[in-house]
């Protein structure tokens, strides 16, 4: 069973990365999570901010999730320490 964390989206970093304030974690989680987690959305790879389209991708993600509650089904942590997860707005 995958770990699941819930939180409020506080900031969008780029088109596929954002920060949540963790408000709840599933009791069956195997791992511990910080109060603030940087989340990378699994299975997408969008432009970085400094490349063409990067700012557009960030604005699109902001309009979709900024200030909303999300659930994150955790897949792993990447080399940068970000939680890689499938994300749903709840």
Image (cartoon, helix red, strand yellow):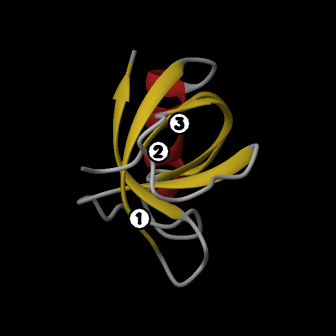
Question: Which residue is at the far bottom?
Answer: 79
The quadrant in which residue 88 appears is top left
Task: Choose between 40 and 56: the one closer to the eye.
Answer: 40
Looking at the image, is 17 positioned above or below residue 27?
Answer: below
Residue 9 is left or right of residue 78, and the answer is right
CB within 8 Å, label 2 to label 1: yes
Q: Secondary structure at mark 1?
A: loop
Q: Please name the residue that numbered disc 3 is placed on.
A: 59
- Give coordinates of residue 40: x percent, y percent: 46, 57
Task: Choose between 37 and 11: the one closer to the eye.
Answer: 37
Q: Secondary structure at mark 3?
A: helix
Residue 21 is left or right of residue 65, and the answer is right
- Give coordinates of residue 18: x percent, y percent: 58, 47
Q: Please report the residue visible at 40 percent of the width from the left and 15 percent of the height from the top.
A: 90
Please count the marks in the image. Answer: 3
Q: Please report the residue visible at 44 percent of the width from the left and 53 percent of the height from the top.
A: 16
Q: Residues within 10 Å of mark 3 (few under 14, many from 20)?
A: some
Q: Please name the residue that numbered disc 2 is placed on.
A: 56
Residue 75 disc label: none
CB within 8 Å, label 3 to label 1: no
Residue 47 disc label: 1
In three-dimensional space, the C-alpha distance between marks 2 and 1, rounded to whole angstroms, equals: 9 Å
Task: Choose between 47 and 74: the one closer to the eye.
Answer: 74
């Amino acid at each position: 069973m995958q770990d699941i964390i819930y939180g409020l989206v506080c900031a969008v970093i780029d088109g596929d990365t954002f920060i949540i304030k963790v408000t709840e974690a599933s009791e069956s989680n195997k791992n511990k999570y910080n109060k603030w987690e940087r989340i990378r959305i699994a299975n997408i790879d969008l432009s970085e901010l400094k490349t063409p389209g990067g700012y557009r991708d960030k604005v699109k993600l902001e309009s979709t999730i900024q200030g909303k509650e999300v659930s994150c089904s955790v897949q792993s942590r990447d080399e940068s320490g970000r939680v890689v997860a499938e994300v749903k707005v709840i």
